[in-house]
Amino acid sequence: MQKSRYERYRRLMRLFHRNHPWQLDDGVHMPHTYLEARILSWWDEVGFIVNGYRVVVWWEHLRTKYADAIHRHACDQAGPCPELSMFKSEEKCWKRVGRSRKKTVGYRTQSSSAEERSYFDTITAKEDQLRLGGIEYSVRPSMTVRRYSWGIGVELCTPQEVRNIEEARSLASMAKRLIKRQVTLNELFPDTSYDRENWLNESSDRANDVAQAHT
């Protein structure tokens, strides 16, 4: 039964790739552009073909998961979220059709309450504070592979930078080796982790990237 399910996935993946041509640049799908020079990278996406299957890699740097953990800590410290007024009720927007008929063309939600604005302001303030000092948290390289009807999806978290086309190609090459089991994460990044010390050491680089983005 398990083998039959995998065979079905293989047929669907090959069929999808055959019926939906993929634009590749020397064998690599790169949907993003790299126009701004930056010091640090956070996430990216690349794709390639393995054995007739489409493979999409959703990559994150270790610092991205660390930043996500900071946000979760800030939310926990802010307490429970109030009930959002925008989901309580909504007003229909009408458009007249003819002399006596009208139809709904959209919905207008309520604006946020003072309680909601205060709650999200609290999260922002706490997150800014935690970003300055960091938190006791550690991230290690990881990879999760899932099969879909359109191909294979890979969630990959590693410490290298992906800031330009060359580094995106390098990411795709590494991911392909991992998919083919030619190498493991432990072999590529032995004893690698990202923690508060790494986060604080990158403070000036993050500030420089933010300043560069606003120039």
Image: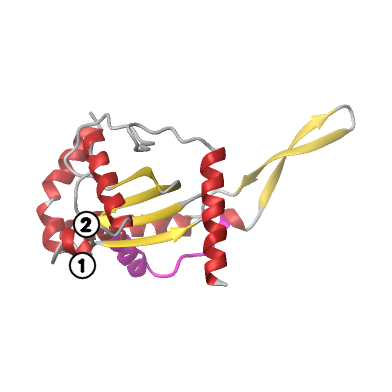
Q: Secondary structure at mark 2?
A: helix
Q: Amino acid at mark 2?
A: Arg
Contact (Cβ within 8 Å) of mark 1 with mark 2? no
Residue 194 appears anywhere in the view: no
Q: Position of residue 132 (x, y in %)?
A: 17, 56
Q: Quadrant of residue 98?
A: top right
Residue placed at 47% from the left, 59% from the top? 115
Q: Position of residue 133 (x, y in %)?
A: 16, 61
Magenta segment, prevailing SS (helix, strand or loop)? helix
Residue topped by disc 2:
131
Q: Earlier in the sequence, mark 1 or mark 2?
A: 2
The magenta stretch spans residue 70: yes
Q: Position of residue 198 (x, y in %)?
A: 13, 58
Q: Position of residue 177 (x, y in %)?
A: 27, 53
Give the color scheme: rainbow, by chain, secondary structure or one colour.
Answer: secondary structure
Q: Nearest the camera: 35 or 180?
A: 180
Q: Amino acid at mark 1?
A: Ser
Q: Which residues are magenta?
A: 69-85
Q: Characterize the local packing of mark 1: few (<14), some (14-19) or many (20 or more) Cα atoms within 10 angstroms.
A: some
Q: Residue furthest right?
A: 100
Number of numbered markers:
2
Q: CA distance from mark 1 to mark 2?
A: 15 Å
Residue 130 appears anywhere in the view: yes
Instruction: Indicate left or right for 3 with 101 as reference.
Output: left
Instruction: Indicate left or right for 172 with 40 as reference.
Output: right
Tell me the mark number nearer the camera, choosing from 1 and 2: 1
Q: Nearest the camera: 168 or 88?
A: 168
Residue topped by disc 1:
138
Q: Nearest the camera: 68 or 180?
A: 180
Residue placed at 36% from the left, 49% from the top? 57
